[in-house]
Image (cartoon, rainbow, N blue to C red):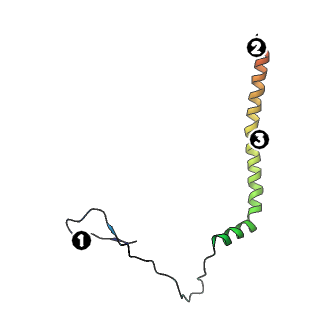
């Protein structure tokens, strides 16, 4: 929508909006480079057919590395707490 300019002196400060504005349509174009747009379903199907396998392998490797890096400090902390509990005379 295009904003309209206020030409009156006592007009409001914010621009008015022309609600009847429509963008031009490309019906009947003879341009060779103009293609009809694909649907979202066609775009996602092409993506998953071509690139999803490679992306999945790399993301799975990164996810595994992150999980291992998160588990190592937890296991080390648990073993330290268990060692502390065995050395302290609690009873």
Relative horizontal placement of residue 41, taking residue 60 as reference (left or right): left
Q: Is residue 50 above or below residue 91?
A: below
Q: Is residue 49 above or below residue 90?
A: below
Alpha-carbon span between mark 1 and mark 3: 67 Å
Image position, residue 39 (x, y; %): 63, 73
Relative horizontal placement of residue 32, taking residue 70 as reference (left or right): left
**Mark 2 vs mark 3: which is more N-terminal?**
3
**Mark 1 vs mark 3: which is more N-terminal?**
1
43 or 65, which lies in front? 43
Q: What residue did someone put label 1 on?
A: 7
Instruction: From the image, state whether disc 2 or disc 3 is nearer to you.
Output: 2
Image position, residue 46 (x, y; %): 71, 70
- Circle 1/circle 2 CB separation < 8 Å: no
For residue 57, the mark is: none
Q: Residue at x 20, y 67 (%)?
A: 9
Q: Is residue 29 above or below residue 11?
A: below
Element at badge 3? helix
Q: Residue at x 61, y 77 (%)?
A: 37
Q: What residue did someone put label 2 on?
A: 88
**Mark 1 vs mark 2: which is more N-terminal?**
1
Q: Quadrant of residue 32?
A: bottom right
Alpha-carbon span between mark 1 and mark 2: 85 Å
Q: Residue at x 76, y 35 (%)?
A: 72
Element at badge 1? loop
Alpha-carbon span between mark 2 and mark 3: 31 Å
How many numbered circles does the render carry? Answer: 3
Q: What residue did someone put label 3 on?
A: 68
């Amino acid at each position: 929508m295009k904003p309209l300019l206020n030409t009156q002196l006592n007009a409001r400060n914010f621009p008015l909006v022309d609600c009847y504005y429509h963008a031009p349509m490309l019906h009947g174009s003879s341009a060779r480079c103009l293609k009809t747009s694909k649907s979202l379903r066609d775009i996602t199907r092409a993506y998953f057919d071509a690139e999803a396998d490679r992306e999945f392998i790399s993301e799975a490797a990164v996810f595994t590395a992150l999980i291992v890096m998160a588990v190592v400090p937890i296991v080390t902390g648990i073993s330290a707490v268990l060692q502390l509990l065995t050395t302290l005379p609690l009873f």
